[in-house]
Amino acid sequence: MNRLGNKLTLTTFGESHGPAIGGIIDGFPAGMEVDFEAIQKELSRRKPGQSNLVTQRKEDDEVEFLSGIFEGKTTGASIGFHIKNTDQKSKDYSHIKDIFRPSHADFTYEKKYGIRDYRGGGRTSARETANWVVGGALAKQFLKDISFKAYVSSVGEIELKKSYQELDLSLIDSNDVRCPDAEIAEQMANKIKEVKKAGDSIGGVITGVIQNVPVGLGEPIFNKLHAELGKAMLSINAAKGFEYGSGFEGTKMLGSVHNDLFNQDESTKTNYSGGIQGGISNGMDIYFRVAFKPVATLIQSQTTIDKEGNLVEMMGKGRHDPCVLPRAVPIVEALSAFVLADLSL
Amino acid sequence: MNRLGNKLTLTTFGESHGPAIGGIIDGFPAGMEVDFEAIQKELSRRKPGQSNLVTQRKEDDEVEFLSGIFEGKTTGASIGFHIKNTDQKSKDYSHIKDIFRPSHADFTYEKKYGIRDYRGGGRTSARETANWVVGGALAKQFLKDISFKAYVSSVGEIELKKSYQELDLSLIDSNDVRCPDAEIAEQMANKIKEVKKAGDSIGGVITGVIQNVPVGLGEPIFNKLHAELGKAMLSINAAKGFEYGSGFEGTKMLGSVHNDLFNQDESTKTNYSGGIQGGISNGMDIYFRVAFKPVATLIQSQTTIDKEGNLVEMMGKGRHDPCVLPRAVPIVEALSAFVLADLSL
Amino acid sequence: MNRLGNKLTLTTFGESHGPAIGGIIDGFPAGMEVDFEAIQKELSRRKPGQSNLVTQRKEDDEVEFLSGIFEGKTTGASIGFHIKNTDQKSKDYSHIKDIFRPSHADFTYEKKYGIRDYRGGGRTSARETANWVVGGALAKQFLKDISFKAYVSSVGEIELKKSYQELDLSLIDSNDVRCPDAEIAEQMANKIKEVKKAGDSIGGVITGVIQNVPVGLGEPIFNKLHAELGKAMLSINAAKGFEYGSGFEGTKMLGSVHNDLFNQDESTKTNYSGGIQGGISNGMDIYFRVAFKPVATLIQSQTTIDKEGNLVEMMGKGRHDPCVLPRAVPIVEALSAFVLADLSL
Amino acid sequence: MNRLGNKLTLTTFGESHGPAIGGIIDGFPAGMEVDFEAIQKELSRRKPGQSNLVTQRKEDDEVEFLSGIFEGKTTGASIGFHIKNTDQKSKDYSHIKDIFRPSHADFTYEKKYGIRDYRGGGRTSARETANWVVGGALAKQFLKDISFKAYVSSVGEIELKKSYQELDLSLIDSNDVRCPDAEIAEQMANKIKEVKKAGDSIGGVITGVIQNVPVGLGEPIFNKLHAELGKAMLSINAAKGFEYGSGFEGTKMLGSVHNDLFNQDESTKTNYSGGIQGGISNGMDIYFRVAFKPVATLIQSQTTIDKEGNLVEMMGKGRHDPCVLPRAVPIVEALSAFVLADLSL
């Protein structure tokens, strides 16, 4: 399905080389003044060509709202929007028409549907995530008292070891990597450039931090706050893992250390729980990590197979991201906001 | 919400100290011969009191089917079932009526609902997962050609370093820990006993392996196979993280290494993808890891607060699991099966 | 699917001759004091054997709540319940095992599922509606300021021509037919007895009236209040039609007559709209009519076919309703309440 | 919500005076060759200005598909589309900005949302139904062996008394009314012109006929085929009632007459059931009737109130339908097809 959310829903469409991508946001409350500039700004954080660390495709990514907003305010009606595709170069992709790129969805789409729009990845393209950023940007405005931040906390082996409390999160956008530590950011940038030069790609981790969350968001059994967050994050192209609070490291701890003891004001002394107890927010910071694999498309020759099972050599062409992390930061923030908005209705 | 799945759904109810827990399975195909013994066997793998590593509560956990099965076969009608609660001792819990246990859902339920059944955790009790095992056991029978296995791969710092391919998965139930390596299992068992003796608790990791999966399961955008698996696993009490395929480790790799090259038979030479491309199964093994924190209830004195914000000393009573991992193995398998059954319809 | 509602849901199970029927109510608000007696009273209005106009089966129809209620109040957790089947006589039905009763769901179930529980109609039995009455009775208590009434307004050709405003709706239960006009009720009762004597059956119409409805319930496009009401009513066994406000008669009117002009207090002078504009309640009374066909099971010989297509004579046995209308009144009320509760959340 | 369907869904957006309306069709099977001309033809049957019986607005109603179709075939990806609004004259509507038109959704939207796009009805405009026609036209192509027909069977008091079997349904589009009986059609047309001249409006009934339906469509309990059909039809602007098979008339019959006896080939001798038993299609023709009220907007002076409760005189302006029936015929067909496509997946 092409729908995220239960009460607030985002339904999307679009292939990277069709006329447009877009979506419908349903269930958005009426009467909210929309800050269009803020939405466009989030899209610009995600768009290609914004720095020399990312793909050099040139998409303006201008969102047009078609409904649900009247005289600058939401009306409670469904909000339709689209983003035109302006820089698609379909010729670029004819060489992959009949072959399956390694670690790409070419093969699985072909087998599932018997047909696929192979141009630029078609529906599998991460271009889809621009739709999510629109939904998330509106959600951020709805939940204006909650802060949604994300940053790159590792690229390959280069890891930012400081916890989010030790960082100045206002510096996230101060460099192209979107890592709020200038020194580590530079190391990451250099690594990405090195990998790019080699026609290779590299993965990494994004940390998300949600602050000033009211107590009580999330459902107890199957729509736990962290399960919904995890599902949303795992929907991002190239995502391979999600952990929150103490995560995988916490598995090594004893309960007597891991338990977050209460202060008398109902806050907790530690926060291994990551702001969520039994699937419901407890008012402490929510923090989590999302793992991203190195993207599959390389500017290197690889041996693969075609539809008939013949071995063929292929050479990635086109303009690809050597590392998706910098552009994925606004996506992680957007989905965080969307999930919380959905659970808050 | 208390519902898992989209086309095949499991809706559940029940508190640990009410008369019964249970559920309704909707969308199950007609005409399948039900192996009741196999279902009961799965429940026995999850039930308390099965070994000295787990809680000594005595629940028979006998499932009664109330509908949807006629003369031993599913009819396509909704399948209602319940499991009676037979060993609840409500007195055990009166001491926690007005206090919030650290790192427990007591606090968040109280704030969200203004009321809670405090006896034995009420709705937050992991007893709920017995319902999931019933759903998963039926799903396993429906997908009888697919193999669903899970095992304990770490307890605290004790880690089974072998990959699942190096293990004999038929040995999972050969020891109480449910770790298929006898030597490591013994270390884990000793660790759990030590922790138990100290009235403490400890976490760990469960690895899941799904084999013989047909190509094409999963939806491309928001119901990706791994996102649905992740959501289901993160719904398990005490779960803190989920990763599949190369997971968090894969973030450190280069794309040229990480890419899974095809063989001419459409299998891949490596499987960092974990059997899923673009959210859709590619026919290779699906494998994943789930992190579990140390459970919150300790048989130690802890300082906490009551509803009025007074500091109080509390001492965990009752019969608790020092480590949930051994009993969580059948839950991981059950949810795996349920998610795949849902996506296969 | 076996689920009604979107935010407040009722999921059900059960065959007439299984051990029990039941359901799960999910999304019910926390903190409501439950009046169990009132629920049981609604069930008694629906149960068989209550008068000589209806089937003489003897079911106690006692509902047992299994979860979601603690110390008499709802907790926000899912509410599981069941109603045991106590008077099933499976022998009664062996004669219909291999044949398709005319105008019954025997044929369509067999073709759709390839298997069916033929005893007493199995899942097709109107016994299922006892579950709905439980859900509706709880919904009524939640919406305690809204009045939900229904009554029999025709049986065969005998029609109560007065509008609901001309009737004393407190008299609905003053006779076995549940028609608030004593004289017409007697005619209806005589008609039903006559039909019963002949081993035949007869249909009729139930009018529903919902009063004191707040403005604003219902969704504009696809979950219009009247569309949801209509869907719910058409789900009742034997229902063949639904109209609200001016209904089919209103199609003959001119707009200049049909339009409901406003009073200055925002009420309207007439109410052809039936309390709903654009799918949303306007605060005026909601009223509607539901058509019920004569039930298919007769105590007469009918020629029909068996699974092999052979012509066979069959004679209805067992204890059947000659007219479902009197027992359907509480079902119409229950579904009205459930639909409005769902839309009010 | 702005979504129709369960497995096949149509999510929509759009106000009559925004830049465009549109929708997303999700769950449509892959590999179907799309006949774009046929879709456009259905839209032309619904569009304004097509004859002198309907509104003289001039909308081209050209649908543009934005995704989900590649080289003329569906790909299984979500199908986004929009229809530009080209003839909106927003000045026309400033006179109704602060007043509530009688029997219109102005009042209920204002109360529910506190804001509304008053231009041309905004989201309440029947222009929305153009989106439904797109969805239905695709569904018709998917279910190409099933025939979906609808026709005007009454306008005001003028009633086509023949049953659908006595009519030549290929003549539906042979006149502007869309009534397949030329003589009655002319009476209807004259009536509509008379009403139009008077600045008034009039209602009527549309009969739908679905033929060549496979056995087994529909779900037994809450997604009965007729309940889903009814819900869809009641979603159409101005719809007031729905009945299928023998409908309200059938309530007057005895069961011994109403029962549809089987032929040995599993067809039935009569078809009072309307092709549906227990919510599931039995292979016989499905037929139903939908009641439409006279539309509320008149070209006459009416007294109404404004937001402050002042009495004001208003005079409908603009270009309105005196009778929605002719343009509603393709909508009824479209929704029929969409509902059956949804249930067939």
Image (tube, coloured by chain):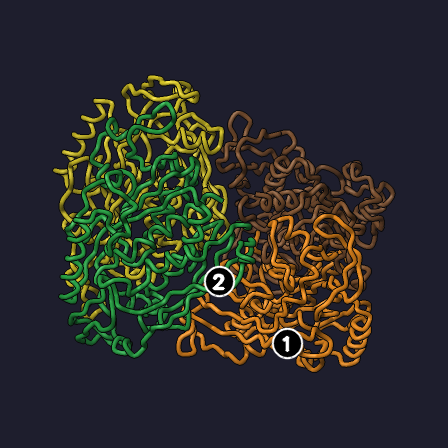
Chain colours: A green, B yellow, C brown, D orange
Q: Position of residue A14 (x, y in %)?
A: 40, 67
At x 82% / y 39%, what residue is drawn? C168
Which residue sits furthest left?
A: B183
Residue A59 falls left or right of residue C30: left
Name the image quarter holding residue A18: bottom left
Mark 1 belongs to which subunit?
D
Mark 2 belongs to which subunit?
A
Residue C174 falls left or right of residue C89: right
Name the image quarter holding residue A313: bottom left
At x 29% / y 69%, what residue is drawn? A57
Q: Residue type at mark 1?
A: Lys
Q: Position of residue D235 (x, y in %)?
A: 63, 59
Q: CA distance from mark 1 to mark 2?
A: 24 Å
Q: Is residue A50 above or below residue A306?
A: above
The disc placed on residue D58 is: 1
Q: Is residue B241 above or below residue A19?
A: above
The disc placed on residue A335 is: none
Secondary structure of residue under mark 1: loop
At x 42% / y 38%, what residue is drawn? A220
Q: Is residue A40 above or below residue B60?
A: below
User: Does the rendering let one see residue C184?
Assistant: yes
Q: Is residue B290 above or below residue A13?
A: above
Q: Nearer the viewer, residue A173 or D157?
A: A173
Q: Nearer the viewer, residue D33 or C203?
A: D33
Secondary structure of residue under mark 2: strand
Badge 2 is on which residue?
A65
Q: Residues within 10 Å of mark 2 (few under 14, many from 20)?
A: many
